Image (cartoon, rainbow, N blue to C red):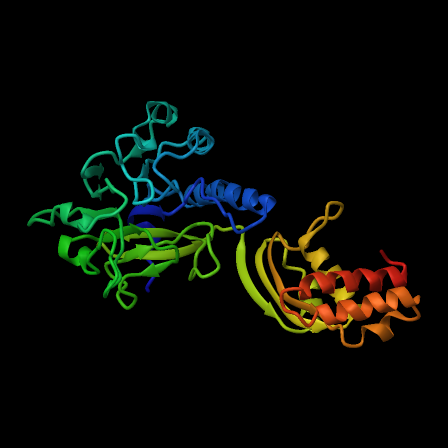
Amino acid sequence: MKKTSEDDVVLKLLHTADWHLGRDYPSFSEEGRRKLARARLDVLDNVFAEAERNAVDAVLCAGDLFDEPSPKRDWWEALATKLAKKKWKRPVFLLPGNHDPLLADSVWRDPKFRSLLPDFVHVVDKDVLEYPFGHEAVLYAVPCHNKAGQDDPTKLIPKRVAGDNRIRVAMVHGSTFDAGDRQTNFPISKDAALERGLDYLALGDTHGFRFVPPDRKLPPTIYPGTPEPTAFDESDPGHVALVLINRQHRATVDKRRVAHWHWEAAHLTDLGALRAMAGRADLANRVMRLTVEMELSAPEYEEAEGLLAELGGTEACHAKAGVLQLRREGLTLDVSNLGAQLGALPPVLQAAVSKLQELAKDGAQRPAAERALFHLFRAAKGTT
């Protein structure tokens, strides 16, 4: 898309959505859960720095800013404190989404939270917010009042009328995909920007950056995605949208990465691949889901254990991977030739090895038998 000349820009916006402050990550370790939850707040420093660096006229925050309607005080207080530290006057618009709708008891109506917000922050707490940017532009914003609904929020935005030559921007939260036999939540027409006479439609809900529809760039309808990824299967998360709109009402969109974490899943089936993974220098900012599926001899198994400890860390050593989710059920010990690897053992231990090898043939007892055999191997080596 042809870039807009800075001299011709009438309105400059930073569009973000889906912060999900307070989100939990129960499938990770306690330490990993804390890191990932805190990152959702930390990334806002990058979001607002992008806004400041580009001297935008406003910041549009398109819903699901909290993971639930009534988050713990730690989260809303930390957000309000972060915003209050900003030494600027540009407006910031906070839109309730379907995760954090505008309910009677939601955070958006909490007087304590609202009292902490600086004057430049505007909570969209009416059916339709209309905010003029001087005489040349206007913003319309429609909040979610419930966690689910079948009404298109853009239907509440007035259509452009004859003689209205302002730049018209709107912000809503909902889904634009064709639901098929699934239930669409707050379904938004993919042509809403055209139907309502908008020059830019800021959306929130899905977590990856994308145009809707993907082959239409003007007028842009954009999901910026979540600024910090939340799952391994998300497509192109971790961004905000920088939007420049010129006097001809032409909007250009620049995708800017703000995330700290990269989420990566890997399936390792041989020791060489595990060695290569442990040798990587880019793991500190990786959330790794590592599936290990290989059968190894006792010496190889011992090496693999050491490499996994390097990746995940120990009580005494920092982890190479920023956050590690390890699936090691497929890592097994080859017990067939273990006797030779153990060396000379007293008869009683030789008998124990034979018994454990038999038990290892039973799928239910194999994990315990393998652990016992591995401990015998290390004891025989003097490495326990």
Residue 116 rendering spot, x and y as whole percentages: 39, 24
Which quadrant of the structure image shows residue 254? Answer: bottom left
> How many badges with numbers are in the image?
0
Quadrant in the picture for the N terminus: bottom left
Q: Nearer the viewer, residue 292 or 90?
A: 292
Residue 113 rendering spot, x and y as whole percentages: 37, 27
Q: Is residue 19 visible?
A: yes
**Left or right: residue 101 compared with residue 50:** left
Residue at figure coordinates x 42%, y 32% from the top left: 76
Residue at figure coordinates x 31%, y 38% from the top left: 93
**Left or right: residue 382 compared with residue 358:** right
**Left or right: residue 198 compared with residue 307:** left
Quadrant in the picture for the C terminus: bottom right
Q: Is residue 8 visible?
A: no
* Figure check: 324 above or below 47: below
Q: Nearer the viewer, residue 273 or 269?
A: 269
Q: Nearer the viewer, residue 199 or 194?
A: 194
